[in-house]
């Protein structure tokens, strides 16, 4: 980690860093993990998907989130995935407008979390997404959780975002007061609220400038595509949504319509996206994977394979037919938006 210049105080240095670490508003995609038939990392599929998402206009990419099966990977494989994504980003984008790559770095101890942050940076990540440690949740106080995040932020090789996902943290659900306490640290630069609590999102969005000295440098995002518009209405800066693996343009368009004041059109699109996202929520990353070849062509068939203990959804089963039918409206919109973009 870089050392603090001697001419600055530690706090001044951290505040200066927070400005350069700021995340742009928009749609961030928690990418799926793709494996080869031999059960290795499918680098080609990973980079093909990265290029597809960047072409759709997303603001950033997230690797090793809950959609990314990081818990099914070794540390070496996690490094390989980040490297593959970072390499694709360098080839697909203008170096003067870098695309954030946020890596999931959650672990139960401060020591391992910091190791994961360093390894993520070494592989090409720009930010880390950190869950609260939940294994000993029954004896872990809010003060200890705040201290944990502040310690990670102060010592991490890259700035961090809070990942509030109770289902992945043994039920730990950080309330808005605790989130705002954590947000006082300048190198905590955002939060993903997969808890789905839009009231909490509103309180955090309104409270962050007050606890950060008036600075608007903290990214507040919902963690699901079924409340993109609701989040924007109460002050969110974007979304980190698994369904954006399938329909990134539709998710981006909701924000564009909102920014233009076209609320009726934004609501109509949000309704269709929420209908489709319900299937992604019910079936999880396995369902999103199953939808890849349905909507992006048979060439993506290998992408539908999860790692054990999960198995691929049966192509002829009720679940796949339900996914195809339930997502069809949103995916038709996605296809139309792609044609529209190609014609411009």
Image (tube, rainbow, N blue to C red):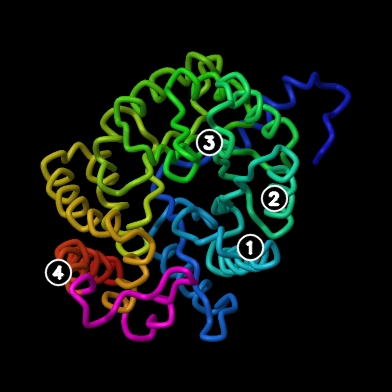
| Label 2–label 1 contact, CB within 8 A | yes
Q: Is residue 262 above or below residue 139?
A: below
- Checking the image for residue 325, the label placed there is 4
- Side (left or right) of 75 relative to 205: right
| Label 4–label 3 contact, CB within 8 A | no
Query: Which comes sooner in the sequence, label 2 or label 4?
Result: 2
Q: Is residue 302 magenta?
A: yes
Disc 3: CA contacts within 10 A as few (<14), some (14-19) or many (>=20): many
Q: CA distance from mark 2 to mark 4?
A: 40 Å
| Label 3–label 1 contact, CB within 8 A | no
The picture quadrant where one finds residue 196 is: top left
Magenta-colored span: 297-320
The residue identified by callout 1 is: 78
Q: Which element carries disc 4, helix, strand or loop? A: helix
Q: Locate the N terminus and report the quarter of the image it occupies.
A: top right
Q: Which element carries disc 2, helix, strand or loop? A: helix
Q: Is residue 69 above or below residue 220?
A: below
Q: Is residue 145 above or below residue 315?
A: above
Q: Residue at x 22, y 66 (%)?
A: 331
- Checking the image for residue 116, the label placed there is 2
Count the marks. Answer: 4
Query: Which comes sooner in the sequence, label 4 or label 3?
Result: 3
Camera-nearest residue between 134 and 43: 134
Q: Locate the C terminus and report the quarter of the image it occupies.
A: bottom left
| Label 4–label 1 contact, CB within 8 A | no
Disc 4: CA contacts within 10 A as few (<14), some (14-19) or many (>=20): few
The residue identified by callout 3 is: 162
Query: Which comes sooner in the sequence, label 3 or label 1?
Result: 1
Q: CA distance from mark 3 to mark 2?
A: 15 Å
- From the top left corner, tell me how far across and down residue 82 is, in percent: 62, 62
The picture quadrant where one finds residue 314 is: bottom left
Query: Which comes sooner in the sequence, label 4 or label 1?
Result: 1
């Amino acid at each position: 980690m870089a050392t603090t210049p001697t001419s600055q105080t530690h706090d001044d240095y951290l505040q200066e860093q927070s400005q350069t670490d700021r995340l742009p508003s928009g749609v961030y995609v928690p990418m799926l993990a793709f494996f080869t038939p031999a059960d290795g990392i499918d680098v080609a599929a990973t980079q093909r998907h990265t290029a597809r998402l960047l072409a759709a206009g997303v603001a950033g990419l997230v690797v090793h989130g809950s959609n990314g099966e990081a818990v099914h990977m070794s540390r070496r494989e996690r490094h390989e995935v980040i490297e593959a994504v970072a390499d694709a980003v360098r080839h697909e984008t203008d170096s003067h407008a870098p695309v954030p790559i946020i890596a999931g770095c959650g672990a139960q101890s401060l020591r391992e979390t910091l190791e994961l942050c360093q390894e993520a940076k070494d592989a090409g990540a720009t930010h880390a997404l950190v869950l609260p440690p939940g294994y000993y949740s029954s004896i872990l106080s809010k003060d200890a959780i705040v201290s944990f995040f502040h310690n990670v932020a102060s010592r991490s090789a890259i700035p961090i975002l809070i990942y509030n996902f109770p289902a992945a943290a043994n039920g730990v659900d950080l309330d808005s007061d605790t989130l705002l306490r954590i947000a006082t640290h300048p190198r905590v630069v955002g939060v993903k609220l997969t808890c789905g609590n839009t009231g909490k999102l509103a309180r955090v969005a309104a409270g962050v400038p007050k606890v950060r000295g008036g600075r608007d440098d903290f990214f507040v995002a919902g963690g699901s595509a079924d409340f993109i518009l609701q989040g924007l209405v109460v002050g969110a800066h974007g979304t980190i949504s698994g369904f954006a693996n399938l329909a990134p343009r539709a998710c981006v368009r909701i924000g564009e319509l909102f920014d233009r004041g076209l609320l009726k059109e934004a609501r109509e699109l949000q309704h269709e996206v929420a209908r489709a996202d319900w299937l992604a929520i019910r079936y999880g990353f396995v369902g999103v994977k199953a939808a890849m070849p349905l909507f992006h062509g048979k060439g993506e068939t290998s992408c539908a394979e999860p790692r054990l203990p999960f198995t691929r959804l049966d192509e002829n089963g009720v679940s796949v037919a339900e996914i195809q039918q339930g997502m069809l409206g949103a995916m038709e919109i996605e296809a139309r938006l792609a044609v529209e973009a190609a014609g411009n």
